[in-house]
Image: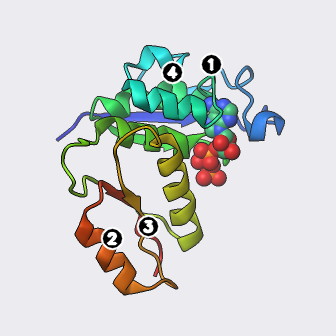
């Protein structure tokens, strides 16, 4: 069983809408966490070169507060509980962690992301694809309202990660 890490951002009162809801400066120091390491650049996280390229190409340069604490423990295989306001970068945190851990040589599903709605599943798939754009990974979301045979075809051909949404 992996050790667990809780990464939580309790700084709700200082949040504003700058930078898509991210306020990197004001969120500092307001965490409940059992994991104390902070990595304030993506370059220092020990990520794959091609994942870094995807992250920067996605348009994010400096990790948000939750990313500074959440990505590295995720990459180390710890069980991570992330808690932060909407729009603070949680999706990119766990997507980066998953992409870092995927074995690109192995065309088998190695990660499942469960989402409560089909829209969210598809949104996560989009982020995963974008961040993994320079990696050799295939991602697919299986959601209701789409052609099941097409899902079967794609899954049979092999994917690395999937996001089953709400059916
Ligand atoms: N480090 C960053 N710097 C700037 N923008 C970022 C950063 N990380 C994520 N974003 C952008 O912020 C927005 C919200 O990010 P994201 O969807 O990952 O947040 P979230 O916490 O998962 O939100 P929700 O709880 O609503 O699912 C997105 O447009 C994303 O591209």
Q: x%, y% of residue 151?
A: 36, 77
Question: Which sits earlier in the primary sequence, circle 1 or circle 2?
Answer: 1
C-alpha gap between disc 1 and disc 2: 44 Å
Mark nearest the camera among 2 and 4 is: 2
Q: Which residue is mark 2?
A: 154
Q: Is mark 4 within 8 Å of ligand 1?
A: no
Q: Residue at x 63, y 31 (%)?
A: 60
* 69 to 12, vertically: above or below: above
Q: x%, y% of residue 18?
A: 82, 34
Q: Secondary structure at mark 3?
A: loop
Q: Residue at x 18, y 48 (%)?
A: 106
Question: Which sits earlier in the primary sequence, circle 2 or circle 4?
Answer: 4
Question: Which sits earlier in the primary sequence, circle 1 or circle 3?
Answer: 1
Q: Which residue is mark 1?
A: 29
Q: Secondary structure at mark 1?
A: loop
C-alpha gap between disc 2 and disc 4: 32 Å
Question: Which sits earlier in the primary sequence, circle 1 or circle 4?
Answer: 1
Query: 126 left or right of 35?
Result: right
């Amino acid at each position: 069983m992996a050790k667990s890490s809780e990464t939580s951002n309790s700084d709700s009162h200082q949040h504003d809408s700058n930078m898509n809801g991210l306020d990197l400066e004001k969120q500092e120091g307001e965490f409940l966490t059992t994991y104390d390491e902070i990595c304030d650049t993506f370059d220092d996280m020990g990520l794959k070169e091609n994942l870094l390229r995807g992250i920067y190409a996605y348009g994010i340069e400096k990790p948000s507060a939750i990313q500074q604490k959440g990505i590295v423990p995720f990459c180390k295989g710890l069980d991570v509980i992330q808690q932060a306001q909407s729009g603070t970068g949680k999706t990119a945190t766990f997507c980066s962690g998953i992409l870092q851990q995927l074995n690109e040589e192995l065309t088998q599903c190695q990660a499942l992301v469960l989402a409560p709605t089909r829209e969210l599943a598809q949104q996560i798939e989009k982020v995963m694809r974008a961040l993994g754009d320079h990696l050799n990974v295939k991602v697919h979301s299986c959601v209701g309202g789409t052609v099941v045979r097409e899902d079967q075809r794609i899954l049979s051909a092999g994917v690395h990660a999937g996001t089953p949404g709400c059916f």
